[in-house]
Structures are given as C-alpha cells and as structure tokens.
Image (cartoon, rainbow, N blue to C red):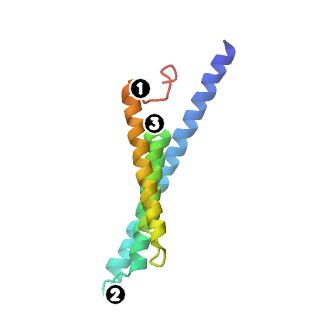
Amino acid sequence: MKTQEKKKNILKIAYAFETILAIVILIAVLLGIFDTIRIIYGFYIINFNSPVDYTQLNQIFAQILLLVIGVEIAVMLTLHIQTALLEVLLFGIARKMLLLPKSNSMFEILLGVVAIGGLFLIKKYLTENSALSADNSDDIPDEII
C-alpha cells in the first residue's frame, strides 16, 4: 500500500514539473512575441523606404512559426493527449518546408509532403481508434486530480 502511495506522489510531482515547464515555455513565447513585433517594426516601419526581401520575410516567418511550435509544446505538456504530439510534429515539418532556402531540391519538399500526409493518416487512425474504444483521452488518473 505504501508503494502505491509513493507512486502517486511521484506522479503528482512529475505532473507539477510538466506544468511548470509549460508555464516557462509560455513565458518564453510571450517574450518571443515582443521580439517578433520588434523585428516587424524594424523591417516595415523604420526601413519603410526599402522593400522587404525574401530573407527578411523568411526570418519573420521562422520566428512566428517557432512561437506556434512553442505554444503547441506547452499544450502537449499539459493535456497529455496523443494528437497533441502529432500537431507539434506537423507544425515542425510545416515550418521546415516553408523555410527551405531557394536552393534546396524538390525532393525535400516532396519528403515534407509525404511526412505531413503520414501524420494526417496517423491522426485519423488515432481518432478512429479512440472513438471506437470510447476511452477517455485524458491520461491523468482521476485520483490525482
């Protein structure tokens, strides 16, 4: 009986650490939003006479998509659902595909499209299985909450 209680306490501590890490990630994302606004202000407001080139726009997209991935990681840490991991991977692959340099080959883009298609198939398979089993998607045991 004591070992069961120790396991519950360890699990509570682990969930608390995950929550703290999610909060730290969200704070970093909030600070990153201010940095993104500063970058956009510098490119579009201060240097309004010069047109924004591909590398500057690529830098803005990279920053914004990285913030989206950070938010998705925080969601993944707090919700404990299988589809959250797939969404993080989906945004990561999409970010990589959108930010490919012009010199890269079409093979890398094709590989990204295949990877995203595979993630959609996995997501469809997971949602069908969870609907069939009528299982609660929350992995946190009720006695912990």
Between the C-alphas of marks 2 and 3, the distance is: 46 Å
Between the C-alphas of marks 3 and 1, the distance is: 10 Å
Instruction: Kindly state the secondary structure of the residue where label 1 is placed.
Output: loop
Horizontal and vertical percent for residue 2? 68, 14
- Residue highlighted by disc 1: 136
- Which amino acid, mark 1? Asn
Q: Which mark is residue 47?
A: none
> Is residue 35 visible in the rendered structure shown here?
no
Q: Quadrant of residue 16?
A: top right
- Residue highlighted by disc 2: 50
Q: Is residue 61 above or below residue 45?
A: above
Instruction: Kindly state the secondary structure of the residue where label 3 is placed.
Output: loop
Horizontal and vertical percent for residue 139? 49, 29
- Residue highlighted by disc 3: 81
Instruction: Kindly state the secondary structure of the residue where label 2 is placed.
Output: loop
Q: Earlier in the sequence, mark 3 or mark 1?
A: 3
Q: Earlier in the sequence, mark 2 or mark 3?
A: 2
Q: Are marks 3 and 1 in contact (CB under 8 Å)?
A: no
Extreme residue in the right direction: 3
